[in-house]
């Protein structure tokens, strides 16, 4: 196990700066996920930690030791790649133990670690097969097995599930979580999939355009996003962001005046109003007809239902409020139909108000 630290790290490719002043501390045994859209710099950050790219400025520490100039093989890290990176001419067993043999580990150690890894990943019956004889999920397990037997200080995962179908991704997320629970190895995981980030990470690092936008637990990001980008990137479906006008005592939304929760806004509000963005997650809406008497909720009346998408237990409503669109996720108890209007209730304390220029959250 090891701690990892990025201190003021920049990365340039030619005249293009792709990472800007990255500062991040990762604790021993922590599972940290780097998430963001394509081109945000998350894979470059991982490759800098692995030693596959050179740092342009700043320092990277592993166990409080600067590793900027250390070759990858001397950093005691193990990496699982998106494309598996298996040797096609070697069988599963040979692929898994390749690193140990290269390090001249003893036969007893090799056999012990191979046995443990193959049992954990359910690969015993495939040990003599070549990668071409395996499914995508099996090949990914072999790649993970090769990392596990290394007994590395840090595990690195570079979008390892992106080539798998939805069912296999769910299964492999479970496997990765189980492996981390078993080994407690410090892990850094890169993905563009916010579902993977939310389900795997002890903490999640949201990146955009080479900057870290926010670091926090999955629920901190979900409930307290620092800006509009984090609010809309984390959560599926994403947060509703609506044009509104903020006043000291209420917020006006398409002509409707909704009272503010006490101390919701953390900045002063001009008496003549301030144009803002109003945010509320689809999951926080409730059908007024199903609300118990006495619940202190805010009501958004007469919202037009455009399209309803059944999702099993949930129903996703695509709605129109004046000239704006929004979504609500309701359960099967709601009898709302397409073309109807609905009164939606929500807890104003779960709402967010964003500055229209900086896009920063004014409620945290």
Image (cartoon, rainbow, N blue to C red):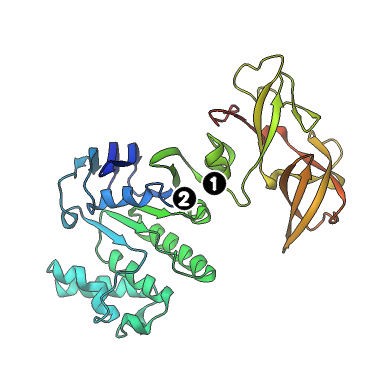
Q: Position of residue 41 (x, y in %)?
A: 37, 47
Name the residue that disc number 1 marks.
233
Q: Which mark is residue 308?
A: none
Q: Which mark is residue 37?
A: 2
Quarter residue 4 falls in: top left
Q: Are marks 1 and 2 in contact (CB under 8 Å)?
A: yes
- In this rendering, the count of numbered labels is 2
Quarter residue 57 falls in: top left
The front one of 82 and 181 is 82
CA–CA distance between discs 1 and 2? 9 Å
Q: Residues within 10 Å of mark 2 (few under 14, many from 20)?
A: some
Which residue is located at x 51 percent, y 46 percent?
A: 218
Q: Can residue 50 be seen? A: yes
* Quadrant in which the C terminus is drawn: top right
In the displayed orientation, state which residue is furthest to the left. 104
Q: Position of residue 289 (x, y in %)?
A: 87, 46
The first of marks 1 and 2 along the sequence is 2
Q: Position of residue 95 (x, y in %)?
A: 26, 75
- Left or right: 123, with 248 as reference point: left
The front one of 157 and 219 is 157
Q: Can residue 261 be seen? A: no
Q: Position of residue 34 (x, y in %)?
A: 41, 48
Quarter residue 181 falls in: bottom left
- Left or right: 232, with 104 as reference point: right
- Left or right: 18, with 172 as reference point: left
Residue 246 against residue 94 in the figure, above or below? above
């Amino acid at each position: 196990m090891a701690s990892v630290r990025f201190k003021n790290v920049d990365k340039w490719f030619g005249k293009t700066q792709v990472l800007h002043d990255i500062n991040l501390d990762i604790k021993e045994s922590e599972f940290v996920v780097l998430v963001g859209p394509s081109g945000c710099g998350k894979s470059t950050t991982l490759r800098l930690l692995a030693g596959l790219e050179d740092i342009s400025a700043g320092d990277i520490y592993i166990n409080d030791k600067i590793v900027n100039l250390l070759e990858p093989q001397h950093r005691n890290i193990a990496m699982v790649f998106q494309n598996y990176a298996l040797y096609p001419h070697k069988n599963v067993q040979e692929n898994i133990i390749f690193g140990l043999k290269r390090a001249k580990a003893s036969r007893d150690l090799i056999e012990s670690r191979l046995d443990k890894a193959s049992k954990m990943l359910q690969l015993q019956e495939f040990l003599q097969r070549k990668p071409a004889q395996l499914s995508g999920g099996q090949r990914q397990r072999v790649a993970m097995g090769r990392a596990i037997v290394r007994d590395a200080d840090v595990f690195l995962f570079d979008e390892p599930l992106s080539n798998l179908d939805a069912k296999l991704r769910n299964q492999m997320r479970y496997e990765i979580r189980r492996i981390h629970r078993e080994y407690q190895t410090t892990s850094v995981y890169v993905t563009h999939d916010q579902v993977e980030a939310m389900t795997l990470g002890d903490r999640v690092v949201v990146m955009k355009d080479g900057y870290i936008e926010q670091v926090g637990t999955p629920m901190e990001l979900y409930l307290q996003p620092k800006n509009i980008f984090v609010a809309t990137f984390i959560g599926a479906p994403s947060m509703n962001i609506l044009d509104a006008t903020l006043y000291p005592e209420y917020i006006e939304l398409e002509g409707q005046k909704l009272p503010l929760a006490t101390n919701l806004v953390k900045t002063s509000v001009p008496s003549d109003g301030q144009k803002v963005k109003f945010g509320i997650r689809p999951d926080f809406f409730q059908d007024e007809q199903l609300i118990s008497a006495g619940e202190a909720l805010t009501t958004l009346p007469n919202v037009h239902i455009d399209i309803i998408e059944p999702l099993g237990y949930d129903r996703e409503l695509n709605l129109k409020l004046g000239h704006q669109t929004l979504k609500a996720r309701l359960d099967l108890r709601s009898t709302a139909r397409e073309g109807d209007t609905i009164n939606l209730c929500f807890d104003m304390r779960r709402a967010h108000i964003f500055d229209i220029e900086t896009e920063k959250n004014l409620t945290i």
